[in-house]
Image (cartoon, grey):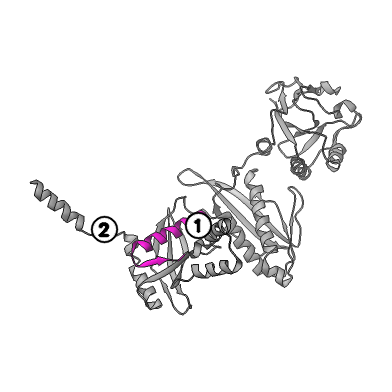
Amino acid sequence: MRPAVALALVAALASLPARADPGTAALAPFLDAVAACAGRPDLTLAVVGVEPGQTALAREQAEEIRLTVETRLQATGRVRLAAAADVVRIKALREGTTGLSGAEAEGQIRAAFAGDASVFLVEPRRAGETVAFRLQAITRNAACKATSEPVLVPVRIGPGVADVDAVMEQAVRAFTQAAPQAGAVEICPFVAEGGHSTCAAVLTDRLVIALDAEARSANRVLKGARLDVRRKAPGTACEGPVTARGRVLQDRDPGGGPSTWMELEFRRDDAVLAPTGRRRIGTEGLGCDPTPRPFLDHLAATARTDGGRLAVSATATPYAAGQRLEMRIESKAGQSLYCWVVAPDETAYVALPVRGNAASAAPLKAGDVRRYPRGYGLDEIVAGEPFENLFTCFGVAGGLPPDLAARWLAAAPGTDSDARLLPPAEVLDLVDRIRATPGVTEAAARIVVR
């Protein structure tokens, strides 16, 4: 091909219109309808986004999809965008630099919504790795609206992941509608199906936050409608007139990956008021591990360990029947020790200190190494039937608070008496309270007899 012909061909191809994005082209009928509503061809639209209470999308996904819709609308060349969804960012920027009076902020908010119509993303539905929804535009005077055909947009995270806080807020809203006169609600700790999960406590925290927000809402304050939010400690009875009960569970996708689900319901006596049903949730931003574990594994995994202050080890792993059991305790800082033996069934008995044995209650110094039980003048323990327990010590500079220390010693062995077996409810409550003590550290070792 001659150079002149080739250049002419390139020029001709360059002059052809670019191929339209199918997603952008599909918006033409919608924009025609909005223009007819607004009575003008050049449109200024405020893309508000999805409803806050929806659960098909996590918040990050919802924001990403809103920005995708804005990009497609701009690509049509027919639309200017108002900053409706971004007014909070603008306000924060202005206040952080030049300052912003109340009147100026109000004017800015009004200007941000001053488009010809506000555009909402309604009825989002997940399908595989995409989400389908409709655009619904409502004019400023609310006299006319236009609705698009379904719009399909890809999402980054796998299907069916709900935003945890949105699920909580939706459940709280349903509860207040079902029981508007309720003045108090007891929050039972979330439970993990098939074991113990660190996400159970985190989900309980998120529910407390959602209910606390409802209790402090302007609507309740103005009406004087008090709502007392009470959180029950793990292992304690949860029997209030109105309770909130949740659980977290994990299973595997057909493709082999793990999925995390939560369920939450409010109850008045035996009546269920507001169930969420089974909702798949994303745990990436929760800072927890949804994997259910046996109690001893969970206790060890969540311990507030600090090898620079305290270390515990067994002198053999495993022990054989007839072998003497012994634990090595190394204190690398000055602290008082509180040790117990925990069983897989969530029961426990206190090992140290021993009431009436001053040496067992004396604080350890940095560099001290003790052997339990012989190093404390206690009788030897000889391995018998096979078992597996966890020997755990809490180290606290200055000792536990008086109330906790009294509870611990009340269950401890005496020089002439055995330790009291602690039931699961008391074990869970003590773990929760001792771990909340400032400066506490833990060290644990398995006692395995085969």
**Tag 1 near tag 2, CB within 8 Å:** no
- Which residue: 74% across, 52% down? 232
State left or right for residue 150 relative to residue 224: left
Q: Using the rendered image of the protein, determine whether residue 366 is visible from the camera's viewpoint.
A: yes
- 63 above or below 220? above
Q: Name the element at disc 1.
A: loop
Q: Please name whichever residue, 222 or 151, is drawn nearer the observer in this view of the structure.
A: 222
Identity, as a three-letter code, of the amino acid under mark 2? Arg
Residue drawn at (63%, 40%), measured in percent from left and top? 293
Please identify the quarter of the rendering in which residue 409 is found.
top right
Q: Position of residue 449 (x, y in %)?
A: 71, 26
Q: Quadrant of the C terminus?
A: top right
Disc 1 designates what residue?
57
- The image position of residue 212, as x and y in percent, is 69, 59
Which of the 4 quarters of the picture holds residue 35?
bottom left
Principal secondary structure, stretch drawn in magenta: helix
Q: Nearer the viewer, residue 449 or 108?
A: 108
Look at mark 2 in the image and give the residue it sits on.
19
Image: 41 above or below 130: below
Q: Secondary structure at mark 2?
A: loop
Q: Residue 43 in magenta?
A: no
Percent across and percent down for residue 282 are 54, 50
Identify which residue, 268 or 122, lies in the foreground.
122
Query: Is residue 62 in the magenta section?
Result: yes
Lateral position of residue 330 relative to residue 290, left or right: right
79 vs 331, left or right, is: left
| CA separation in Å, label 1 and label 2 | 31 Å
Crowd around label 1: few <14 · some 14–19 · many ≥20 (10 Å): many
Magenta part of the protein: which range? 59-82
Badge 2 density bin: few <14, some 14–19, many ≥20, Cα 10 Å: few
